[in-house]
Amino acid sequence: MRMSADLRDLFLYEAFLYYNPLLLVAFMIWLWGVNLWVFAQSSVNYAKVFDLAQTHLSHREIWRCATWLTLIVPTSMTAYLYLYSHGEVSLAAFQPVLLYAILLMILFSPFDIFYISSRFYFLRTVCRIILPLQAITFPDFFLADIFTSMSKVFSDLERSVCRMVNRQVATIAWFEADSICGSHSIAIPLVLVFPYLCRFFQCLRQYKDTKEKTCLLNTLKYSTAVPVIFLSALKYHVFPEQWINFYRPLWLISSVINSLYSFYWDIKRDWDLSILTRIFMFKNPSIWTNLLYGQNWVFYWVLGSNLVLRCTWTYKLSAHLRHNYLTVFTIAALEILRRWQWVFFRVENEWNKMTAKQNLEMSSNMPSEGDRLLDSSDHTV
């Protein structure tokens, strides 16, 4: 209350920076639990799709993890705000550092606690995403696709860790935009583009292994995000006239290309639109089956919302549009929602491919009617 309006806004922005990425991670975990619940109710065997062990986490265990994260992140944020506003600056600065340290220790703990098999499965998959030195599996590129939707989360995590390492938490040292942890840092576009580069190299690896031309087209899709990110970052490193007259039009063109190409790929390659709502045909019919299965409005909603959110996602990728942190947070949350509905149809499409392949192999191995007659030793003439 004693702060000026501008200083208070910067103070809240800093507090928001440390905690908003973790809130978005918690939001993503909640939605992943919903995905698993729907898969469990339908005929989609997600455990087989992801090649999971028998001890894989159920949706209830996923929700339990999300509950703990949803509780401890706001608690730490409340402690930070309370201590800072009461003059305990050093104790306030310790709160986000302690929270990040605890979460990292839990994630990398070698002890048989907190679902060790699932944690290590996740970490192994992340390693394969960063270093695609082996054949790309469905879990590899599936998780990498989810990471592209969380590039803003990774960018904010990098900004937070930068300020913690440089002891700038709860200080004014980072107010200067051109400082090492400032808003004009080159690290921001580098972190934003990293998930797209991972998918880019995954697609090249898939092409090397399969020689399928669609892998190169997919590579092109991820490469269209690169100019969107770096042209936006150029605003802080060129003269204003250059930005307005040359770089901003290029940024707009690249944004439109990236949004439309990504939308086309979703509906043409990632999903099977002929069976768009089949996943909602639950084993035990419920109100959700009546509401969603075979309904045309689901078809139009998925297409319309995916197109709109693909376009608004460009806002988040553009560093020069990230001043209003509440707006960017909302758009990042909406992108996570878009990815959540994408998961339903992408996993179902993969399951349908697997079952179709199995059925084809079974039919090819079955003897024909004529072969069965010839092989029979019981017939008489």
Image (cartoon, rainbow, N blue to C red):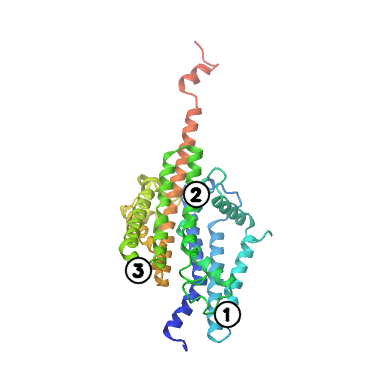
Q: Residue furthest right?
A: 111
* Marks 2 and 1, how far apart at CA: 39 Å
Q: Nearer the viewer, mark 3 or mark 1?
A: 3
Of the numbered discs 3 and 1, the one sitting upstream in the chain is 1
* Three-letter amino acid code at the position of disc 3: Pro
Circles 2 and 3: CB distance less than 8 Å?
no
Q: Which residue is mark 1?
A: 92
What's the mark number on residue 240? Answer: 3
Mark 2 or 1, nearer chain start: 1
Kind of residue at disc 1: Ala
Identify the residue under disc 2. Answer: 141
Q: Is residue 377 above or below residue 91?
A: above
Examine the rendering and report whether any part of residue 357 can be seen.
yes
| Residue 102: quadrant of the picture | bottom right
Q: Nearer the viewer, residue 20 or 224?
A: 224
Question: Closer to the camera, 165 or 263?
Answer: 165
Res 8 → quadrant: bottom left
Q: Secondary structure at mark 3?
A: helix
